[in-house]
Every structure is written in structure tokens, then in C-alpha cells.
Image (cartoon, rainbow, N blue to C red):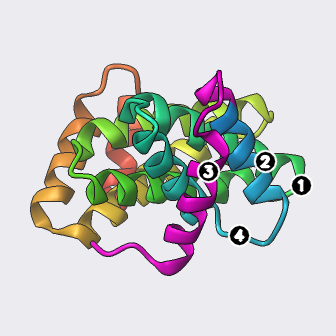
């Protein structure tokens, strides 16, 4: 999957921002928030760029995914945007980034969906709605990559003990 020029540009900006930072994870969170709140950038693109830049800085995919998904959703919340919709876009961006670097899409999906649910819950919005949106977006993004990717993500989300199984299964059936 080829990166869009927007994602590549954002990634380069974020790499420059976090490289050399004493606390890469905090610098990453701040960079994601700045990109979302500082302009009309798509949360999906910002999350993908954040994950890719974190990987360049040596942060694990799971940690990068959690931090960027959370930061993206919280930035949308700070600007008064729709955090449930943002949760889906953030998860899509995470799947796109994981695919780009050849990481385990199932693990990326579970991590992204967990964090999306948590971040939306912190804003006081419905975690059930966030679960449905995040799962549907993860499956849709993975299906866009290929049949095997879609199966991997469905299997991982269904097997994840940390996710509400009934909501996950319902969202997968509806996707």
C-alpha cells in the first residue's frame, strides 16, 4: 500500500519533531495533537504518520498505535469534533500504517480498537458506539488491503479478551 503524499509529509514533520527528544512517547503525543488541532488534517492520516514516525524512532508498533490513536481522538475532542467518528478514522490510520511497515495487522487492530474505546470513554461519549465504529473501520481498512488482511483482523478482534465480544461480533457482522 503506497502512502499518500499527505501522510509522507506529516511523517517527515513528526520524525523531525520527535527525533532527539528525551521522551519520544510524549513528543509523539504532542506532535499528533498539534497536527490534528493545528489544521484540518484528517485524523486517519495523522495517526498513520504518527505511527510510522514512531517506528522510525524505535518505538514499538503497539506503543506507537496506542499513543497516536489516543492523542488523535483527544485532539478531536479538544476541538469539539465528533470523537466517535474520529475513533474510526484513527483505527483506519493505524491499520494503514501497520500494513505499510509489514507489521501484524491483527495486533495493530486490537491495540487501536482498545485505545479508541478508552479515549472515547475518557471524553464521556458512548464506548459502545466507539466500539462499533472502531471495529467496523478496522475491518474495512483491512479488507481494503486484501482478503487475508481482513480475515486476520476479524480473527484477532474476535479473539481479544480485552474487547467486548458481543459488540465486536455485532460490528463484524454488520461490516
Tell me the quarter of the image containing the N terminus: bottom left
Q: Which residue is mark 4?
A: 41
Q: Which residue is mark 1?
A: 79
**So how many labels did they put on this image?**
4
Depth check, front residue: 148 or 84: 148
- Range of the magenta residues? 1-26
The answer to whether any part of residue 135 appears in the image is yes
Q: Which residue is mark 3?
A: 16
Q: CA distance from mark 4 to mark 2?
A: 11 Å
Q: Position of residue 121 (x, y in %)?
A: 70, 31
Observer-side mark, 3 or 1, equals: 3
Q: CA distance from mark 2 to mark 1?
A: 6 Å
The answer to whether any part of residue 88 appears in the image is no
Cβ atoms at labels 4 and 2 below 8 Å apart: no
Q: CA distance from mark 2 to mark 3?
A: 20 Å
Q: CA distance from mark 4 to mark 3?
A: 18 Å
| Residue 37 picture quarter | bottom right
Cβ atoms at labels 4 and 3 below 8 Å apart: no
Among the two numbered marks 3 and 1 on one chain, the one whose residue lies closer to the N terminus: 3
Amino acid at each position: 500500500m503506497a502512502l499518500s503524499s499527505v501522510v509522507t509529509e506529516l511523517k517527515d514533520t513528526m520524525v523531525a519533531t520527535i527525533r532527539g527528544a528525551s521522551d519520544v512517547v510524549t513528543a509523539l503525543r504532542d506532535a499528533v495533537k498539534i497536527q490534528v488541532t493545528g489544521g484540518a488534517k484528517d485524523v486517519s492520516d495523522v495517526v498513520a504518520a504518527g505511527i510510522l514516525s514512531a517506528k522510525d524512532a524505535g518505538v514499538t508498533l503497539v506503543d506507537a498505535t496506542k499513543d497516536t490513536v489516543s492523542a488523535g481522538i483527544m485532539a478531536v475532542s479538544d476541538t469539539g469534533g465528533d470523537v466517535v467518528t474520529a475513533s474510526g478514522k484513527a483505527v483506519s490510520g493505524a491499520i494503514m500504517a501497520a500494513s505499510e511497515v509489514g507489521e501484524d495487522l491483527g495486533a495493530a487492530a486490537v491495540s487501536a480498537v482498545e485505545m479508541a474505546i478508552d479515549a472515547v470513554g475518557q471524553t464521556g461519549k458512548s464506548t459502545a458506539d466507539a466500539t462499533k465504529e472502531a471495529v467496523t473501520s478496522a475491518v474495512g481498512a483491512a479488507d481494503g488491503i486484501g482478503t487475508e488482511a481482513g480475515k486476520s483482523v476479524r480473527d484477532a478482534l474476535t479473539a481479544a479478551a480485552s474487547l467486548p465480544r458481543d459488540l465486536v461480533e455485532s460490528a463484524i457482522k454488520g461490516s
